Amino acid sequence: MRQSGRIVCRVAGALREGCFTALASVPLLLEYEAVLKRPEHLQPGGSTLAMTDDFLDALCLHVEPVQLYYL
């Protein structure tokens, strides 16, 4: 994933510009948080827990929430 940083930047830019609507549920965002805060993901890029929180907060500003219904 770290090698695809340019693609991630393009997708994030398109999301900010409103080119598409991203959908996410609370469980999905919690999973993103858990994975992004793993040491093996933080260390290579020099990210911190605070930076990860800021990223996820910014992502949530551009995501439409989805409610899940289980049968």
Image (cartoon, grey):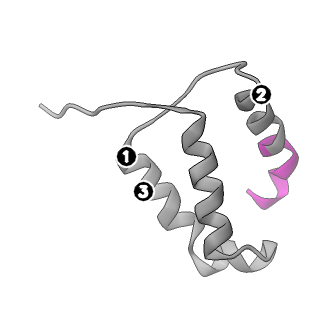
Q: Would residue 6 be found to the left or right of residue 67 on screen?
A: right
Q: What's the residue at 51%, 56% (across, down)? A: 32
Q: Would residue 3 be found to the left or right of residue 12 on screen?
A: right
**What residue type is disc 2 on?**
Ala
**What residue type is disc 3 on?**
Leu
Quadrant including the C terminus: top left
Work out how far the residue at label 3 is from the one at label 1, CA to CA, in angstroms: 6 Å
The number of discs equals 3
Above/below status of 9 relative to 69 = below
Disc nearer the start of the sequence (3/2):
2
Q: What's the residue at 58%, 63% (across, down)? A: 53
Is the residue marked by circle 2 packed among few (<14), some (14-19), or many (20+) residues within 10 Å?
few
2 in the magenta segment: yes
Q: Residue at label 3?
A: 30
Magenta stretch?
Answer: 1-8
Measuring from the top left, give residue 9's x and y in whole percent.
82, 43
Work out how far the residue at label 3 is from the one at label 2, CA to CA, in angstroms: 23 Å
Instruction: Tell me, for residue 26, which label it has, or none.
Output: 1
Above/below status of 63 relative to 56 = above
Work out how far the residue at label 1 is from the one at label 2, CA to CA, in angstroms: 22 Å
Q: Residue at label 2?
A: 14
Disc nearer the start of the sequence (1/2):
2
Measuring from the top left, give residue 25's x and y in whole percent.
39, 40
Question: Is the Cβ of the residue at disc 3 closer than 8 Å to that at disc 1?
Answer: yes
